């Protein structure tokens, strides 16, 4: 049998019904006191009654009046809830607007930074071209003869200018890609001559550092659909890192092989210092080098790999990096054979 004391009744929904009835003038203070005393009495004999039930039992209120009072109170509660909801919505709207504002400020700042990098790089490019032009004329003695010592000084300045030029080009590329404007000029190309060129371009540097650079290319490779200039740059950057982070006597390898019918794999590996476990995610932070910034043992701006990643991803591929500290690093990415590209 159901215990009537445990039955669900509307009165359970409203708090302090007795006080409400007094406030509304439906019962007096004395009526309420009388009912509370009776309620207590019933409780000691094992019957738990709510105040409304008690008032009803004592005939102080009618069933109708009680229902009306409970309904009134539920309506009041509902309207209070609606008010709270409205306030909450307003609060959420205000907070969202504040966050939107903060986001806009942040993106303004980031745009300012990108524009700053972009403007400054373009401004640096013009005078650099002039300097390099004159150094070229001097070193080839087009402006008159110079002695060996002078020639060496001019040649060193020319090399430094070339390095500066490539830094400025990197900065320009960073600003372009951080504005999401990195566009590819894709054509059907043969990767083999590009690989030769990239290896040739770093051979002097490798020789200076006593690091050997070898290329291992499959005899026949399918053509690919890629941006020749940017891909050459990517190979150059990966080889440059390999040479830079490999001590004298070490070896850097550029391997390109066919994988199945549809893919080629480009793999640049070195026997260098490697990358500590757990620091792979730092490789793509702009202007960041793993080496302690204060010691700056290795030159560079910490931009190369970020741009390599952006260019490789723009080609629909991704970098796979494997490295063992003290043993060396291997960076690999696949490219689709041109016959597989559907345009
Ligand atoms: N082959 C590698 N072996 C060991 N560490 C590497 C290698 N390649 C990259 N790194 C680490 O990742 C960092 C970022 O490389 P990234 O090419 O972006 O910058 P960088 O070579 O220092 O400067 P930049 O390329 O702008 O001249 C490097 O400073 C180095 O700490
Ligand atoms: Mg680099």
Image (cartoon, rainbow, N blue to C red):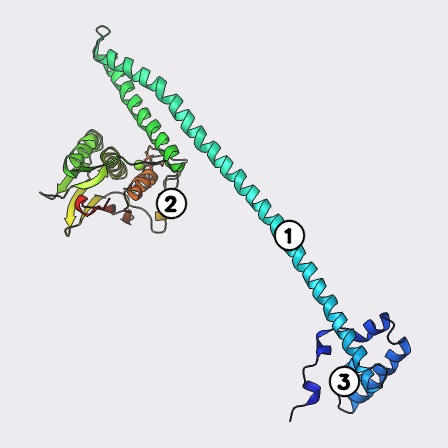
Q: Choose between 9 and 254: the one closer to the eye.
A: 9
- Residue placed at 78% from the left, 92% from the top? 45
Per the image, the residue denoted by label 1 is 91
Per the image, the residue denoted by label 2 is 282
Q: Between marks 3 and 2, how big is the CA–CA gap?
A: 69 Å
- Residue placed at 73% from the left, 78% from the top? 11
Q: Choose between 339 and 307: the one closer to the eye.
A: 339
Q: Mark 1 or mark 3, which has the lower sequence index?
A: 3
Residue 188, image quadrant:
top left
Per the image, the residue denoted by label 3 is 49
- Kindly tell me whether mark 3's CB lies below 8 Å from ligand 1: no
Which image quarter is the N terminus in? bottom right
- Kindly tell me whether mark 2's CB lies below 8 Å from ligand 1: yes
Q: Where residue 299 appears, x then y in whole percent?
A: 33, 32
Q: Between marks 1 and 3, how big is the CA–CA gap?
A: 41 Å
- Kindly tell me whether mark 1's CB lies below 8 Å from ligand 1: no
Q: Relative to residue 2, is residue 19 drawn left or right?
A: right
The secondary structure type at the circle numbered 1 is helix
Label 1 neighbourhood size at 10 Å, few (<14), some (14-19), many (20+)? few
Q: Mark 3 or mark 2, which has the lower sequence index?
A: 3
Q: Relative to residue 291, is residue 265 drawn left or right?
A: left
Residue 37, image quadrant:
bottom right
The secondary structure type at the circle numbered 2 is helix
């Amino acid at each position: 049998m159901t215990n009537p004391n445990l039955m669900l009744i509307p009165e359970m929904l409203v708090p302090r019904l007795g006080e409400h009835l007094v406030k509304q003038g439906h019962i007096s203070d004395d009526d309420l006191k009388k009912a509370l005393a009776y309620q207590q009495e019933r409780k000691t004999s094992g019957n738990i009654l709510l105040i409304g039930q008690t008032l009803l039992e004592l005939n102080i209120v009618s069933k109708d009046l009680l229902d009306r009072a409970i309904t009134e109170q539920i309506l009041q509660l509902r309207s209070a809830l609606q008010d709270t909801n409205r306030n909450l919505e307003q609060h959420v709207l205000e907070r969202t607007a504040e966050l939107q504002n903060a986001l806009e400020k942040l993106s303004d700042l980031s745009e300012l930074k990108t524009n700053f990098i972009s403007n400054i790089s373009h401004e640096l490019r013009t005078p650099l071209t002039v300097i390099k032009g004159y150094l070229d004329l001097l070193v080839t003695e087009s402006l008159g003869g110079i002695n060996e010592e002078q020639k060496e000084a001019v040649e060193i300045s020319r090399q430094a200018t070339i390095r500066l030029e490539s830094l400025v080009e990197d900065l320009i590329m960073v600003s372009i890609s951080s504005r999401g404007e990195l566009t590819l000029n894709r054509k059907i190309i043969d990767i083999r001559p590009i690989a030769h060129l990239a290896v040739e371009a770093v051979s002097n540097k490798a020789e200076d550092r006593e690091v050997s650079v070898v290329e291992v290319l499959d005899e026949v490779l399918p053509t690919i659909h890629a941006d020749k200039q940017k891909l050459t740059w990517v190979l150059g950057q990966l080889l440059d890192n390999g040479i830079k982070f490999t001590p004298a006597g070490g070896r850097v390898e550029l391997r390109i092989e066919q994988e199945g019918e549809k893919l080629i794999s480009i793999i640049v590996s070195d026997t260098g210092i490697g990358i500590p476990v757990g620091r792979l995610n730092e490789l793509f932070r702009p202007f960041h080098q793993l080496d302690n910034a204060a010691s700056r043992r290795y030159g560079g701006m910490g931009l190369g790999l970020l741009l390599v990643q952006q260019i490789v991803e723009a080609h629909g591929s991704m970098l796979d990096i494997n490295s063992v500290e003290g043993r060396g690093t291997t960076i690999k990415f696949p490219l689709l054979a041109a016959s597989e590209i559907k345009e």
